[in-house]
Amino acid sequence: EPEVTQTPSHQVTQMGQEVILRCVPISNHLYFYWYRQILGQKVEFLVSFYNNEISEKSEIFDDQFSVERPDGSNFTLKIRSTKLEDSAMYFCASSLYQGNTEAFFGQGTRLTVV
Amino acid sequence: SQQGEEDPQALSIQEGENATMNCSYKTSINNLQWYRQNSGRGLVHLILIRSNEREKHSGRLRVTLDTSKKSSSLLITASRAADTASYFCASGTGANSKLTFGKGITLSVRP
């Protein structure tokens, strides 16, 4: 069964360092998303991406964040200069269509900023 | 309360019993999706119900949607110990299908 895969599963980084979280969406999906879940809190929307452009982003997704689809399969989230409060589980998701369609999530990358 | 609030926050039942979880939301939605998360792991998609649908079934899952009350319920019948997990509702809104999640319900199914 097709699935969204994320690497690494766990990343520890020092405050101020750049991190890149990687995702391989389901191969025929066209819409891609990043969400995050701070420990014990809700899953929060960060950004949606379609046709090599950001479709929508939340207030959390500030200038420290960027997304890219560098090739036909990968979708990345970059945090330029990590802060302690960026520690969270980051989920990538993809969907085939926009609108009334299921979004399938990856297993997540647990980012720990020390 | 915020978009996508579930209740109860925690539910403990015996194996074989049915589990009912409720979700409320505030704004107009395109759809309502339910997800399961096992112990800090990934979000597994369970079922999607569209705003023009009232009830949907998938295996042991039954989801209802009442747009007049802005609420949804997820029923798991004949629960198993393996159903132990956190369950989230997520409302899909807007052209970009952004999902707004609730805080989740922790379901414990005792063997």
Image (cartoon, helix red, strand yellow):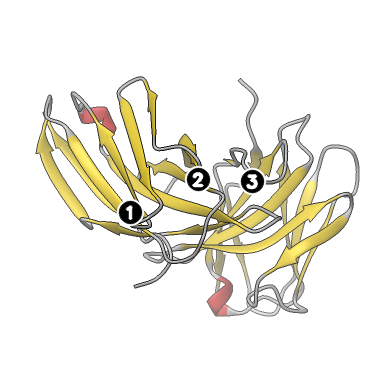
Residue that mark 3 sits on? A93
Q: Secondary structure at mark 2?
A: loop
Q: Would residue B84 appear left or right of A14 to someone viewing this image?
A: left
- In front: A74, or B88? B88
Examine the rendered structure and indicate whether residue A19 appears above or below residue B55.
below
Q: Residues within 10 Å of mark 2 (few under 14, many from 20)?
A: some
Q: What x and y, as percent, mark residue A85?
A: 54, 78
Q: Secondary structure at mark 3?
A: strand
Q: Is the C-beta separation of discs 3 and 2 under 8 Å?
A: no
How far separated are the C-alphas under marks 1 and 3? 22 Å
Residue that mark 2 sits on? B51
Q: Would residue B20 appear left or right of A95 to someone viewing this image?
A: left
Q: What x and y, as percent, mark residue A100?
A: 62, 42
Which mark is drawn over residue B23? 1
Q: Quadrant of residue A56?
A: bottom right
Nearer the viewer's eye, disc 1 or disc 3? 1
